[in-house]
Amino acid sequence: MDIPSRVMSHLKKICEDSSRPVGSAANHKAATYIQEVFLTCGLVVHEQGFACPHWQLTRTELVANGKPLQAEANTFSPPCDVTAPCVPVGTIQELESAVLTGRIALLYGELTKKRLEPKECKVYSPKRDQKIVRLLEEKNPQAIITVTPQIHAVVPVIEDWDLLIPSVTVSPDVGLQLMNVKQPVRVVVVSCRDKSHGSNIIGTKGTQERIVLCAHYDTKVKTQGAFDNGSGVAVLLTLAELLTRKELATNLEFIAFNDEEYNGLGDYEYVRHTSEFESIHAVINIDGVGHFLGSHTVTIMENSQALRDVVSSTKEKYPGIVWVDPWPQSNHSTFSRRGVPSMAVSSVGVDIAHSPLDTVERISADKLAEVVMFITDIVDASDDKPLAWFRKSKKEGTDK
């Protein structure tokens, strides 16, 4: 098999639509393609479905002092056309004391230093974010304007389909202008939301004790998502084609997760249907690989020293891959939190995730092939090892 050509072929197929957020037609199309590839590999395939909305945006407007200003509707924002005074709020303490009824809340500083995790997120919802969302619902402003901390891009700060307050995000420059506006501000969001569905696509070879390989196939809105995470899915599909041809002693499970980018419903559904995490030898998650200007990374969690030694010795064959500290922000955390040895492969370097710059043209076929071969070598090196070989012993304590 010509691995670079094959993995790039999968990438182009997955990314042929502009974006594939959960619930969208493009998301369903990608799921169908993944299922077809798994079936061609001879895997037993099934779906784990869940309900979700499909959100579509037509127009966003922001007007202050009679002049239009640039703004982007926050993902899943309800529609609105409101005109009200703008109240700046920069900290949780200020939010606690602010009077926002009948007004527009201008959130900045500590409140918008990072994306607010959805209040019903099934994977990771820190107490800080929960408190901010609860206060916003209690204060009930007519609309919310969030100031992105990023200088060069307007990235949504709120992406929560359970928060029913209309909201938009603006750049720091626009936020600075709004801080000094004395007249009422107008916010218009023309959007609609329909009932839809999403699903994980799972292909298995054998049952019970197994190695799990996974990647998520959904994207944010307004991004082709080649790096995040068409790249991971392309690697996953190529691994399915390669590994199912091998005579392996170990069973395999390939998971294409959905809704990793928003509420984590795919992870929730997997957990709901999987009671025997103790029968999983290890999980390997691929999320964000292949950028021409990126360096690949690997980290492992909840692992035995023996497993780390195998990953370490295998990595020496690939000088383009570097070790990094464990990080939780992807599907592998669903497994590591349950004591499953977990390996995550990603990248450091130029970050184009979640942006319109995340296109197929920025992805290297050779770098994708590097990840395919690296993971194949690890699966080969750990094949026929017993379950206990992978697991961290009581004597080993914390991750090595």
Image (cartoon, helix red, strand yellow):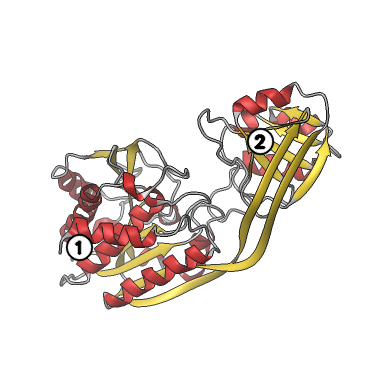
Residue at screen point 48% across, 68% down:
28
Residue at screen point 25% across, 62% down:
239
Residues packed near mark 2 inside 10 Å, few (<14), some (14 to 19) or many (20 plus): many
Q: Nearer the viewer, residue 267 or 12?
A: 12
Please identify the residue farthest to the top as the structure is shown: 180
Q: Check whether the beta carbons of the residues at disc 1 and disc 2 lie within 8 A of each other.
A: no
Q: Nearer the viewer, residue 264 or 349?
A: 349
Residue annotated with mark 1 = 385
Q: Is residue 300 above or below residue 280?
A: above
Residue annotated with mark 2 = 146
In the image, taking residue 281 as reference, residue 312 lies left or right, namely left
Quadrant of the snapshot with the C terminus: top left
Q: Amino acid at mark 2?
A: Thr
| Pointer 1 or 2: first along the chain | 2
Residue 62 in percent (x, y) is at: 71, 37
Residue 184 in sight in this render: yes
Residue at screen point 60% across, 42% down:
116
In the image, taking residue 312 as reference, residue 126 lies left or right, namely right
Residues packed near mark 1 inside 10 Å, few (<14), some (14 to 19) or many (20 plus): few
Q: Amino acid at mark 1?
A: Lys
Residue 282 in sight in this render: no
Please identify the residue farthest to the right as the structure is shown: 102
Please identify the residue farthest to the left as the structure is shown: 317
Cα distance between the residues tagged 1 and 2: 51 Å
Q: Nearer the viewer, residue 396 or 59?
A: 59
In the image, taking residue 125 as reference, residue 180 lies left or right, namely right
Residue at screen point 24% across, 51% down:
365
